Amino acid sequence: MGAYVMALDQGTTSSRAIIFDRSASVAALAQKEFPQIFPRPGWVEHDPLVIWATQHGVASEAMELAGIRFSDLEAIGIANQRETSVIWDRHTGVPVYNAIVWQDRRTAELCGELEAAGHAERIREKTGLVLDAYFSGTKIAWMLENVPGARDRAERGELLFGTVDSWLLWKLSGGAVHATDPSNAARTLLFNLHSGTWDPEILSLLGIPEAMLPRILPSSGRFGTTDPKIFGAAVPVTGIAGDQQAAMYGQACHRPGMAKNTYGTGCFLLMNTGISPAVSGSRLLTTVGWKKRDEPTVYALEGTVFVAGAAVQWLRDGLGIIRSSSEVERLAASVPHSDGVFLVPAFTGLGAPYWDPYARGLLLGISRGTSKAHVARAALDSIAFQSHGVLEAMQRDAATPLTELRVDGGASRNNLLMQFQADMLGLPVVRPKVTETTALGAAFLAGLETGFWESEEAIAALWQEEARFEPKMRNEERDELLALWNRAVQRSLQWAGDNL
């Protein structure tokens, strides 16, 4: 048995590789950012070959940092940005177009047409998802219609579709394996939650040939091995999950009623609802959490905030008021509050519970005394405000009220933000010692399949609390801030509706 498990954590802005030992401690970590491509307003793309090159590079770098060989690995797990869609030639491996990223809004009009035609409720019943440009299905349809020759090639069986996990698995296996797991399949708008298979009716509606789609295998199971030409060893790939489901697993939210929020490019709040899909009355998503081999599927409720850490990146890259994202906490903490400034970072629309692709960002409450510190504070506040809206909706849908929120992701290290989040929620916010929970969840799923970790109970015992933020704000002050925030959000809704 190998001494380590590697997680490939392919995110929206960077590719990472993290090596874990049996105690779930990080033995080595390598990370590389890659370019974001914005061809038009509302369009977001990645180069799939750059995704692969950076992921391959950081995997090799992490091994060098750890001073081990690939033959020392017990297994590899993959966690990936979800919904981002890649189509490539099954023979040459060449992508037919850039990957269309989950944030991309180009198919909002198509979604509106499908909704107007009366398909939204049927799709929601089958998939648990709202009809939105966020998901993969309409992205695939767009590429088939707009990339010259793509539809004919797809119908001849020459093209393959995959979310990023499938693309990486195909590359790692030297083109031998075209597969995904239920947690990623459930984000495509093409997966029937009840049958656990691709849905023929929706495929026909969107004009997508089923032959393009990957096989659906358990999240913790045998996907295949890496081609020895890639890393010099045939390493089993035994775990795959979408990044947010992987984070929920890594946070040991293994029991119904437990919830986590990941603060990354966006915010993703997931609650374990057990082995039956929970229907949301608040426009949250019903989705797959994970599936272990020979066990029932675990489901979750999810609420998505499209722009969280991306708002901080905007402060850095768009406004230039900070040089690195790590500076934002110190700048924001230099003022006691935002002084009435509110940022609604609806740069690519708003997610749950609004689902408005035409909302756009607004900065309100500016006065002559407004400084860059107030804008930075408003940007951090916006992350907590948006997460509050999701959790409030989730609390309405959940049978069991939350007692705490487990947090992870890069921005969870920001103590100012975490305290404000606890104040807004009126609940304890708990940060674990290992905040790399997305990668850890992928590693856990991979290691559980091989026996590297013997049981889910053993995995849960490895989870340790690092910090707990208790709510301190008076209820009256919190309610006033939330009321102002909601007024600001209302002004952002449908802002670009007449222009798209």
Image (tube, rainbow, N blue to C red):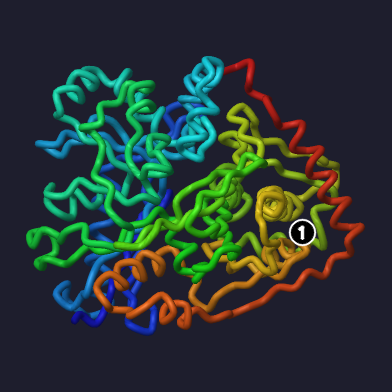
| Residue depicted at x 62% and y 44% | 280
Taking the image as shown, residue 311 lies to the left or right of residue 78, namely right
Q: Which residue is farthest right?
A: 476
**Is there any visible trace of residue 202 in the rendered image?**
yes
Q: Quadrant of residue 64?
A: bottom left
The quarter of the rendered structure image containing the C terminus is top right
- Report how many numbered discs are placed on residues in the image: 1
Q: Choose between 135 and 68: the one closer to the eye.
A: 135
User: Is residue 36 in view from this perspective?
Assistant: no
Q: Position of residue 93 (x, y in %)?
A: 15, 39
Judged from the image, the secondary structure of the residue bearing numbered disc 1 is helix
Q: Position of residue 101 (x, y in %)?
A: 41, 39
Please name the residue shown 10% across and 36% down the image.
91
User: What amino acid type is highlighted by mark number 1?
Assistant: Met
| Residue 379 % position (x, y) | 68, 50
Which residue: 48% across, 30% down?
A: 123
- The picture places residue 75, in percent across and down from the top left corner, at 23, 70
Q: Residues within 10 Å of mark 1 (few under 14, many from 20)?
A: many
Task: Classify residue 282 by image quadrant.
Answer: top right
Residue where numbered disc 1 is placed: 424
Quadrant containing the N terminus is: bottom left
Depth order, front residue of 56/290: 290
